[in-house]
Image (cartoon, rainbow, N blue to C red):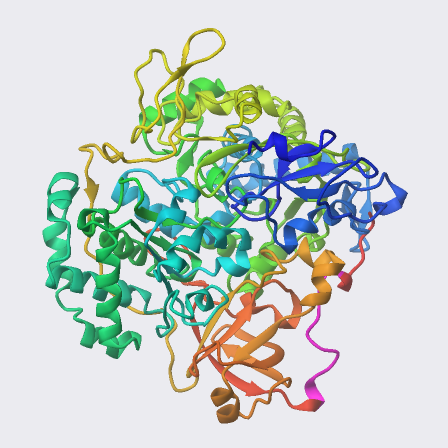
Amino acid sequence: MSSSSAAPAAATLTHCPYCALQCGMALTPAGAPTSDAHAAPEKGPGGRAPLPVVAPRDFPTNAGGLCQKGWTSATVLGVPDRITTPLVRGDDGELAAATWDEALEIVVSRVRAVQAEHGPEGVAIFGGGGLTNEKAYALGKFARTVLRTPNIDYNGRFCMSSAAAAGNRAFGADRGLPFPLTDLGGAEVVLLLGSNPAETMPPFVQHLAGARERGGLMVVDPRRSATARLADDGQGTHLQPVPGTDMVVLLALLHVVVAEGLADREYLAARTSGWDDVVRSVAAWWPERAETVCGIPAEELRRTARRLAAAAPSRGGRGAYVLTGRGVEQSAQGTATVTAAINLSLALGLVGRPGAGYGCLTGQGNGQGGREHGQKNDQLPGYRKIDDPAAREHVARVWGVDPATIPGPGLPAVALLNALGSPGGPRALFVHGSNVLVSAPNADRVRERLEALDLLVVCDFVPSETARLADVVLPVTQWAEEEGTMTSLEGRVIRRRRAVDAPGEARSELWLFAELARRLGSDVAFPTDPAVVFDELARASAGGVADYSGLSHDRLDAAEEAGEPGLYWPCPALPSPELSGPGRSMASAGPDSSGQAEHPGTPRMFLDAFATPDGRARMVPVDHAGPTDDVRADAPTYLVTGRVLQHYQSGAQTRRVPELDRIVPEPYVELHPQLGLRTGVADGARVRVTSARGAVEATARWTDVVRPDTVFMPFHWSGSGSVNRITSDAVDPISSMPEFKVCAVSVVPVPPASHGDGARDTHDAQEVPV
């Protein structure tokens, strides 16, 4: 069924604003006829027009399903504390309403003062993986042509950077899933490491049904998560390693593949380089040794490796996939761990074959597109490296600037945040689409650095914790109030469409960039029409790894009307019928309405060759080092973090949805009953969790889903239960990904007299004018 035929006639076809699954949905004006719809609250803030009604539609990633977040997504359009006017901090220290002219004049004058004293690098930008492709592109362009600062990075550094670094090194290209998500349905085995999609993106689970039916879902997770429980009753296997030892599991699996002659030697000889070095590197990780480190029995490791190998196409299997997520990537050895997963996939001949492969599950809504077009500190549009002279020349022509004026690489996210307000560091910061006070590691230090700035400008639509600290808050549009494109976890470029008007004085960031450029005296053009911005993005990406040059809003709209929702990059503009790009599609080019050939997009990458100079995948030997902050006498317990089904990222949006907030209103600590008895922490009591960076408090929940040596906390809250106040900001040496997912802590009960008013400290803690 086409996506258009699944929606009511009056509906606006768009996508959920949350995760990278980008579930298809329809928004229908309140009162219009609907089917299978969930009514949003009747009125928005201030008695504005009724909010639209959400209904799922038959889009390939969600096939007519939505999770609780998706069903309630329209509620965020009408939250009572929506920011509808610029806010400026006055002499009394409070944020107060201002006009756009007043707010922008303050921003411009203070930016100029910082630049005069500290140079262009004195101003920095922190972006977000939820911005549309158009806004992410314009933000990178604004940083480098108007502010001329190298210091721009984004919260995708916390999400995708390790997988991106490993994918680029191995394949020459980084696309989360280099195959359509629906391909997973035909698999015999899916090995899933460090991801819990049953809670983070529930509609994803239907794509695991085939592997479960065949007993082939294999989940590696120190918790018995909702996803791990899908492997119960003969539907697969749950491997429960010691936190921080996922790489040992992968090295042991590859050792078995080598030792038992299960590798696809013909594929390795034809399509890879570096195999012999990798063989030598895994020789030391025989299963019995691995068991002493990761805790998984040696025979279970052997059974897993054999099952995975038997499913490989080269051995007559139906197909196998290896998938990684944040649990293994948010680590100081995250790039190496993903590389180990890629090595295993290549050894079995999975990558670049229909029905098999390696993939990474992108988290944020536009985590894929957001990193392709210029938000990362070292990249230009099209996934080009900023220090590549040819890339600089190409992008400079599109922007109409001298290549020499484009700054080089800046500081990656953690280093950027730690440098704020320090000698030689940035003195002013623009934040777009991120809530770093809750989402960044070692968050108390981040607060100190933000408070040391001369100027903090936050562009947001709700008063997040970071916005409440700002000198200037600028109200911007959100998902259903704007046009644009997003790129899903499978590299599918899709259309976001406007369904409602923005409230009050809220403006698109595209308008904001154009206005600030004008006021700062730049003559660089900043279009405000998203379709025009996308056309420019497409030109800037032409010839790059992530080539969008054959796409446009019109083409994407026409494809959807024809029943082909979204097109996969690379999708270059074709000067001739000859296909190009890294890894040709299995489809063939077809003509557009003028008869000129159009590239059909690339659903499946690497079928013919990898995007490396010699067309071969590079296999790189890696070894296990363990967590930077490992357990010790004064911190004998592992802390792992993650999400819950009802909340998203820092919770700035979902904590404002009453239906979701009621279900999980505050943070908690999961601990095994054995650990509870050992530490004296009773079920339901208050518990203090302390790391080398500080302490947090929350309510204890006894459960056997965690190991007796481990506690788990979700990260969606601020205040005394904000777990990222104590997570590690040690970073991967290649990707600069922080080590969110594991650190050493002590766990003790909180004496009753010190409980105070509890840990809940959310968006109700401080009112701001709206």
Q: Quadrant of residue 385?
A: top left
Q: Name the residue: 37% across, 18% down.
A: 589
In this view, the residue farthest toward the top is: 594
Residue located farthest toward the right when viewing the structure as drawn? 47
Q: In this picture, is 75 found above or below 474?
A: below
| Rendering coords of residue 394 (x, y %) | 38, 21
Work out whether residue 265 can be spotted.
Answer: yes
Front one among 733 and 170: 170
Residue segment shown in magenta: 753-763
Q: Residue 738, position in %: x, y?
A: 43, 59
Main secondary structure type of the part rendered in magenta: loop
Q: Residue furthest front?
A: 213
Q: Residue 48: x and y, percent? A: 86, 40
Observer-nearest residue: 249 or 547? 249
Q: Is residue 241 above or below residue 121?
A: below
Q: Residue at x 82, y 37 (%)?
A: 504
In this rendering, the answer to whether 378 lies above or below 324 is above
x and y percent of residue 583 in the render? 29, 31
Find out whether residue 614 is within the magenta segment.
no
- Determine whether, in the image, residue 189 is placed left or right of residue 59: left
| Observer able to see residue 280 | no
Give yes or no for residue 755 being in the magenta stretch: yes
Picture quadrant where residue 177 is located: top left
Q: Which picture quadrant has residue 191?
A: bottom left
Q: Quadrant of the N terminus?
A: top right
Is residue 572 shown left or right of residue 697?
A: left
Q: Residue at x 27, y 76 (%)?
A: 293
Q: Identify the residue at horizontal 37%, vertical 15% (top origin).
A: 574
Question: How many numbered marks, from 0 up?
Answer: 0
